[in-house]
Image: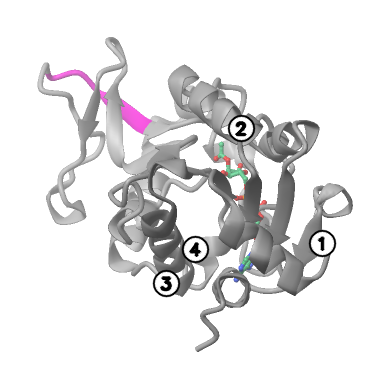
């Protein structure tokens, strides 16, 4: 498949399922995880921060890290890639589904989920926290008004509303994503190294049902050899080429 055929397949698709990873937010200045030079995991070991054990060992350190990321993402802006996905959703309406692994909230701020399609955040969101006892989820105050650790209205300590290593994804979000990818005519996989399951397995559902998988990533990934078409581009440039929006 070439770019022109990929563009036409996307144009003709009634049902489009999209999976995004940290790469789509790189152009908003937010570090990815595994990029050697800027990735979070280049400086920290995941198990030292993003795991239940890390939180049990040192909740203050974990909250320091997440509060810092929360401040950073609120200061960041959605970029052209986020905007083009919100535009694609407006074109496809109810046939559009976006699953993101990102916790930065930038898709929602770009309008995704409000154009007739669906947006699910598979790994949670930095702007929310969970009562440690009841699991109830509450929006955090703005960073300026955030005291650590945040307490729920019942006065109990809350933990970040993030899926940590070794934890399960929200059941309903994952099920909705699996159904959307199984039924998709075209799946777009953008800005993810495709190494963290079950998110990384979603595009295989599309392939199994005879759908087309288009990847956008400056580097090749574990998905590349299985993708119907893989565009070696950044998220915004690749989406411009696919949507015929060359600026
Ligand atoms: P990674 O850091 O693993 O991968 C980022 C991907 O984005 C890489 O494949 C880069 O090549 C690509 N990339 C970099 N710049 C890009 C750009 N401008 N446009 C498009 N792509 C670009 O991040 P994820 O795949 O999102 O999970 O990581 C998946 C999960 O692992 C995260 O959600 C997080 C992490 O542990 C949890 O926290 C549960």
* Residue 220 numbered mark, or none: 1
The residue nearer to you, when weighing 214 against 25, is 214
Specify whether residue 184 is in view.
yes
* Residue 84 numbered mark, or none: none
Residue 212 drawn in magenta: no
Q: Are marks 1 and 4 in contact (CB under 8 Å)?
A: no
Q: Are marks 3 and 1 in contact (CB under 8 Å)?
A: no
Snapshot quadrant of residue 61: top left
Q: Which residue is mark 4?
A: 25
Q: Position of residue 79 (x, y in %)?
A: 42, 72
Q: Which residue is mark 3?
A: 79
The residue nearer to you, when weighing 159 against 186, is 186
Report whether 93 appears left or right of 14: left
Snapshot quadrant of residue 3: bottom right
User: How many neighbours does mark 2 have within 10 angstroms: few (below 14), some (14-19), or many (20 or more)?
Assistant: some
Find numbered disc 1 in the image and state the secondary structure of the residue it sits on: loop
The residue nearer to you, when weighing 168 against 132, is 168
Q: Which residue is mark 2?
A: 183
Q: Position of residue 226 (x, y in %)?
A: 86, 47
Residue 157 drawn in magenta: yes
Report whether 118 appears left or right of 217: left
Find numbered disc 2 in the image and state the secondary structure of the residue it sits on: loop
Residues under labels 4 and 3: Cα distance? 7 Å
Range covered by the magenta-colored residues: 155-160
- Count of marks overlaid on the render: 4
On screen, 227 above or below 135?
Answer: below
Q: Quadrant of the N terminus?
A: bottom right
- Which residue corresponds to the image point at 65% horizontal and 52% vertical from the top-left? 189
Find numbered disc 3 in the image and state the secondary structure of the residue it sits on: loop
Q: Are marks 2 and 4 in contact (CB under 8 Å)?
A: no
- Which residue corresponds to the image point at 53% horizontal and 36% vertical from the top-left? 50
């Amino acid at each position: 498949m070439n770019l022109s055929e990929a563009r036409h397949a996307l144009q003709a698709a009634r049902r489009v399922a999209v999976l995004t990873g940290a790469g789509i937010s790189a152009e908003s200045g937010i570090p990815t995880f595994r990029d050697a030079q800027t990735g979070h995991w280049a400086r920290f070991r995941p198990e030292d921060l993003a795991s239940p054990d890390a939180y049990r060992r040192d909740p203050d350190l974990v909250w320091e890290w997440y509060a810092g990321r929360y401040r950073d993402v609120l200061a960041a802006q959605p970029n052209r890639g986020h905007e083009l996905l919100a535009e694609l959703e407006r074109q496809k309406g109810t046939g559009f589904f976006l699953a993101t692994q990102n916790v930065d909230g930038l898709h929602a701020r770009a309008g995704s989920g409000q154009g007739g399609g669906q947006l699910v955040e598979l790994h949670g969101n930095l702007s929310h926290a969970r009562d440690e006892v009841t699991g109830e989820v509450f929006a955090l105050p703005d960073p300026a008004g955030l005291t650590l650790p945040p307490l729920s209205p019942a006065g109990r300590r809350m933990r970040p509303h993030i899926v940590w290593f070794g934890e399960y994804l929200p059941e309903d979000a994952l099920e909705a994503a699996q159904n959307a990818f199984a039924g998709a005519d075209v799946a777009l996989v953008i800005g993810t190294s495709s190494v963290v399951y079950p998110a990384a397995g979603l595009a295989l559902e599309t392939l199994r049902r005879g759908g087309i998988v288009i990847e956008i990533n400056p580097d090749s990934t574990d998905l590349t050899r299985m993708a119907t078409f893989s565009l070696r581009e950044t998220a915004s440039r690749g989406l411009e080429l696919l949507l015929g929006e060359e600026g």
